[in-house]
Image (spheres, rainbow, N blue to C red):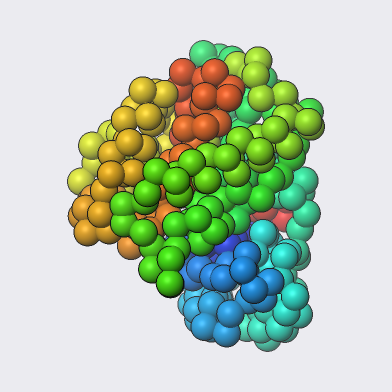
Amino acid sequence: MSRVAAIDCGTNSIRLLVADVDPSTGELVELDRRMEIVRLGQGVDRTGRLAPEALERTFAACRQYAAVIEEHGARRIRFVATSASRDAENRDEFVRGVLEILGVEPEVISGDQEAEFSFTGATKELAGRDHLAKPYLVVDIGGGSTEFVVGDDHVRAARSVDIGCVRMTERHLVRDGVVTDPPAPAQIDAIRADIDAALDLAEESVPLTGAGTLVGLAGTVTTLAAIALGLDGYDSEAIHHSRISFDQVQEITGRLLGSTHAERAAIGAMHPGRVDVITSGALILLAVMKRTGAREVVVSEHDILDGIGWSIA
């Protein structure tokens, strides 16, 4: 077994996985998994730069993770940075800060690499589940981008497009620095138009119909699953490999569209950092399910983070 530390820094959150991995048996034993909402992508879509306060929040989380990694004695570390840092003009400042704190340089990976890691992490343990038909279509809804990957034992096609729960919220729902609550019909229509255009782009590279199983990843999907399951709090074991139907996603999305900040914050499984962006994320998942014709989505807690862990080993 090889003890590894994988860090995934996205637009909305930064996550850590410390695990023992055995490539010869395909076994990954999780030792520590955690997440902080740092909103690294705050304002990037508008300014093209990482905000100083967003960088400081991210560096504070990195300091916490450095202590956890040291505590577990993991010597092999890989830090992957995705959409927000890929787009930012001042990403060198971000790279220097991470290197100073963790001793590794963040890899600002391409959308295709991001998709490959997501697919590996999400599907490696599905291989023995005969009731799940192949090929898999893996959809990873992030803060700044969404990845689409189709494959069976290996990736056949992948595409990353610039729609995500934070990007859509900041682009269409923020007025004078405040999120519209609840959104106006014209704002919802604008989000849907952006999503449909992005799905058209994705479909140029990835067939979005014909997959045997739709697999959904990341915080938007897992939070919607928690709501569908009626959980009082966030429960990873209950959420992992649960299934939520198209009708459930449609009903929950409608409820979120008519809700206030306080009503969303009162949902037991809702992370405080997702309260303002969950509605945009739900619109993305609903549009994906409509486009693919999927009647349900299999929810995975294992995603790009696990894929990064496998890549180290």
Q: Is residue 149 above or below residue 87?
A: above
Q: Quadrant of residue 203?
A: top right
Q: Position of residue 176 (x, y in %)?
A: 43, 72
Can residue 49 be seen by looking at this rendering? Answer: yes
Direction from residue 55 to residue 158 in the image, left or right: right
Observer able to see residue 30: no
* 304 with respect to 279 (left or right): right
**184 to the left or right of 89:** left
Residue visible at 73% across and 79% down? 90
Q: Residue at 52%, 20% (x, y): give it.
A: 294
Q: Is residue 265 left or right of residue 82?
A: left
Tell me residue 57's x, y (percent). Answer: 50, 79
Q: Nearer the viewer, residue 214 or 131?
A: 214
The answer to which of 26 and 214 lies nearer the viewer is: 214
Q: Establish if 64 lies above or below 302.
A: below
Q: List the single residue furthest toward the front.
A: 186
Tell me which residue sits at (38%, 62%) in the image.
179
Tell me where residue 217 appears, x and y as whole percent: 53, 41
Say which residue appears at 23% left-offset and 37% top-offset.
Answer: 230
The relative height of residue 88 versus residue 154 in the rendered view (above or below) is below
Count of residue discs: 0
